Image (cartoon, coloured by chain):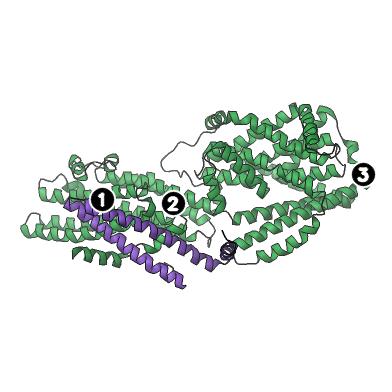
Amino acid sequence: MKLKKLLKKLAAYFDEPRNRQLQTDEGLSRVLKKLKRKEQKLQAAVEQERNAEERELLEQELKIVHSQREKGISLLSETRKGSVVEK
Amino acid sequence: MRNTLRNILLPTIFTILAYGFWISPDFKEISAGVAIFLFGMVSLEEGFKRFTGGLLEKILKRTTDRLWKSISFGIVSTSIMQSSSLISIIAISFLGAGLIGLSQGIGIIFGANLGTTTGAWLIAGLGLKVNISAYAMPMLVFGVILIFQSSRHLKGVGYILTGLGFLFLGIHYMKEGFEAFKAAINLTEYAVTGYPGLFLFTLIGILATVIMQSSHATLVLVITALAAQQVSYENALALAIGGNIGTTITAVLGALGSNASGKRLAGAHFIFNMVTGLIAILFIHQFLAAVDSISAAAGIAETDYTLKLAVFHTLFNLVGIMVMIPFTNHLVRFLEYAIKAEPDRTARPKYLNASALEFAHTALEALRKETARIYEKSTGIITKGLSLNKKAVFSDAETVQLIRRHNRPLAFDIDAAYETEIKSLYSAVLDFINRLPGNTAISKQLNRIWQANQSITITLKDVKHLQKNMLRYIGSNNPHISEEYNFLRQRIANVLRRLEKIRNGDDSSTSILALDALKLTLEKNAALLHERMDQLIRNGDISAEMAISLMKDSIYTNQIIHHLIEANSNYLKSEEGVETEAEHLIALDRDEIGSVLSETKK
């Protein structure tokens, strides 16, 4: 790790609001990556599924994951803009 | 008995100290040194406690899967924190909360015993040779400024610096006190040689450690006295052995409030230190010879008794570990046999105990485990309440077939089961939460635990309401009404099964978010049921009375599913971590689920 990056991390560690923002950013990014993988997996499963009922269930889950990703992406951009995210 | 002893002991110590202060200013200085040193240790512990709940727990979880790793963790953490009692208390509270096993706990205790010997090295090697009080002053100033900062971590650093400052200052006063004392009186004249001396000074070491509640403080006192030639080398060794034995009293007292596993660990600590002390006493001459040859090889001067004491302290603890390692499994078996766990009556909390309250994050883990246990018990009650078998519900069998196989109504008293299995655990959880200080870093998680438990109890009440008509109709001659009630049971069984899969990590990557799909199914089925019911009434398949019951029970079913999802959602969200918080933010609310549902209908 470069010294500048290390110092930035250290400064954020002692600055609570900044630290919280960085943690939210990190958490959202990690979950979004997982959701992307999940969406791809579901997409492949939908294409392979022959049973109409099962296919419908998978499509339903796919839509949920897609909505979650959309929500996550917009939350991430809000966090990066600096608006505080609380729920 | 304990109280009487305490009532006598404290005034006696006060009187002796007051008399000592009156007759000797040097004694006053030495005692003040010990007091400042002990206060430094308290401050140091306070500082490290601010960092628990993050790094320390993560390291502890990752580095205790093997015995050697547990021992290394004990050595390293105690060397850094300079407090074996803090590490012992952490190990006891982790064990009590079920986060680590007994053999891992024993490993940590073994390691902590060796790690604490680094203190002797620091003091003998550095503390006496460098004017450490010069470092103490700036540490105290910077430390106190940091304590006044709002950041938890800065406060922690502040307490650690202040703690170190007081430790150094304490050592300085002890050193100065003994130097001045030397001019007035020579304590070595009272030295006792041979085995009587060994036993006598071991006993003094035990007493001093019990009074000061710290073997570290005893050792520092011994080293400074040895440096000022106020105690003979031979007697100093005995005092160090006594300090090692005396420290177990602190652990035993700490374990009194713990559960059986905490008591077992304290027992292991006691046995280890007794065995180590006994080995040191029995083989004292061999140890002395070994210390001389190690010191000569390491370039320690023949007359540098303080460093030789540090060598001895490390050596006999190391030998103790080497002797005890092969017997670790026997020790675990013996302790499990000797200290029996309370019979697991269903209504007794398993993880909530006083020692788990010691650290907020351990308390949270204990609460999560207890909540998981309550949920597990309640799933048993729910399935029985629905005349189903839990094992079958959680199997891979088709739920339609499963419901068909279990079509006979089975009477089951949900109220009685709630009273004996859930109620006391639920109250214990609430009581435990109330005993934790408010406004902590985990208050959000505690609130979620509370909500999860509340949802579980509401679910059970709703199952009780549903059960009344369900028992009447699943065996009904009217196939339409029995089919509808079986459909309600099937829906709950499906949700229970899916939730179990999510809880067991099938979707561990995004567990909280996986619940959204279940919420969507709940909304979708609620809408479908209305259509089905309309048709049944219009066709005259069910009577008006049946229709009213079915309508009411469909609402109960929806509520049961809703609260089951809520209970799991809050339970999962109570886990600490950036990803959990992010999932909580991303999880869809009811309106968002509604939009997805209307999209799927298109």
Amino acid type, residue under disc 2 in the picture: Ser
Q: Nearer the viewer, mark 1 or mark 2?
A: 1
Amino acid type, residue under disc 3 in the picture: Ile
Residue drawn 70% across the image and 52% down it: B41
Chain letter for the residue marked with disc 1 in the picture: B
- Relative vertical location of residue B118 with respect to residue B513 in this rendering, above or below: above
- Relative vertical location of residue B479 with respect to residue B189 in this rendering, above or below: below
- Mark 1–mark 2 distance (CA, rounded to whole Å): 26 Å
**Residue B70 pos. (x, y %):** 57, 40
Residue B39 falls in image quadrant:
bottom right
Q: Residues within 10 Å of mark 2 (few under 14, many from 20)?
A: few
Q: Which disc is residue B427 wearing?
A: 2
Label 3: which secondary element: loop
Report if residue B257 is visible in the image. no
Image-based side of B154 in relation to B277, left or right: left
- Mark 3–mark 1 distance (CA, rounded to whole Å): 83 Å
Q: Earlier in the sequence, mark 3 or mark 1?
A: 3
**Residue B337 pos. (x, y %):** 52, 30
Instruction: Tally the marks.
Output: 3
Chain letter for the residue marked with disc 2 in the picture: B
Judging by the rendered image, the residue that carries numbered circle 1 is B492
Q: Which disc is residue B185 wearing?
A: 3
Chain identifier, green in the render: B
Label 1: which secondary element: helix
Amino acid type, residue under disc 1 in the picture: Ile
Q: Residues within 10 Å of mark 1 (few under 14, many from 20)?
A: many
Q: Which disc is residue B430 wearing?
A: none
